[in-house]
Amino acid sequence: MNRAALPHPDPEALAALGPDELAPVLDQRVEAAWELCREVHPDLPMPRVWLDLRGQCAGQAHFGRGGLRFNPVLYTENRLDFLVEVVPHEMAHWLVHHLKDGRQAKPHGREWQTVMRRLFGLAPRTTHRFDTGRASPAPHRYVCGCGEHGFTPRRHALASQGRRYRCRKCAQTLVYHPGSAFENAR
C-alpha cells in the first residue's frame, strides 16, 4: 500500500488546540483532501463542511446538503485519527459520488475502496474505532434484569421526575445506574 497522501498532522500541536481552533483545522484538512481529489476529477465541487453530526457516526457525505458533516464530539476526542482517517473516508465518498456513474456505486464498494487505497494511501476501513460514549444520543444508563439501556437526556429527565419505564424484553422497571462507564467518564 502507498504512504498516506495527505501530510500527517503534528499530534502535539493538535492536542494543544482549544475548541475554537479545531474547526479551522478541519476545514484545512478537507480542503487539502479536496485538492488531492481534484487531481483525479478537476471539476469536483468543494464540499461545504458542518460540525453538526450526532451519535456514533464520525462523518457523513451529505449530497443533498452539498457537503460533509462531522461529529464535533468524536472530532474533539480523537483529533489526530479523525483528521487522518475520517476526512479522507468522507472525501472519498464525495469524489466517487461525483464521478460518472458514481451515484450507482455502492457506498463502500470497489470505487470507494480504490480511492482510499490509490489516492489517499489508506486502508479502506468502513468503520471507526472511537469511543462513542460521550457522543451517544442516549448517554444516561439504566439497568434491568437483562441488561443496560441508554436513555436520552429528555427521557432521563422524565424518569427523574417519577415517570417509570419497563424493559420490553424482561418487563422489569428500569433503574438509573450512575456508575456506568459513561457516567464515570464525565
Image (cartoon, grey):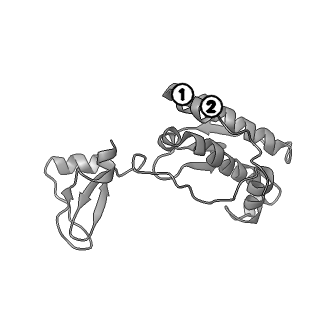
Between disc 2 and disc 1, the foreground one is 1
- Residue at horizontal 79%, vertical 53%? 2
Q: Is residue 156 left or right of residue 59?
A: left
Where is mark 2, residue-wise?
25
- Which numbered disc, 2 or 1, marks the residue that appears first in the sequence? 1
Please tell me in which quadrant of the rendered image residue 21 appears.
top right
What kind of residue is marked 1?
Answer: Leu
- Residue 166: x percent and y percent? 20, 65
Q: Position of residue 132 (x, y in %)?
A: 44, 51
Residue 99 is labelled as none
Q: Nearer the viewer, residue 157 or 176?
A: 176
Q: How far from the left and from the top, in percent, is residue 30?
A: 68, 38
Q: Residue at x 73, y 38 (%)?
A: 7
Q: Which residue is mark 1?
A: 17
Q: Where residue 74 appears, x then y in whole percent? A: 50, 44
Q: Determine crowd level at label 2: few under 14, some 14-19, many 20+ residues with C-alpha closer than 10 A.
A: some
Q: Residue at x 62, y 60 (%)?
A: 126
Left or right: 108 as drawn, with respect to 111: left
- Residue type marked 2: Val
In the image as oriented, which residue stretches furthest toward the front?
A: 12
Position of the C terminus by quadrant? top left
| Quadrant of the frame with the N terminus | bottom right
Mark 1 crowdedness (10 Å alpha carbons): few <14, some 14-19, many ≥20: few
**Callouts 2 and 1 close, C-beta under 8 Å:** yes
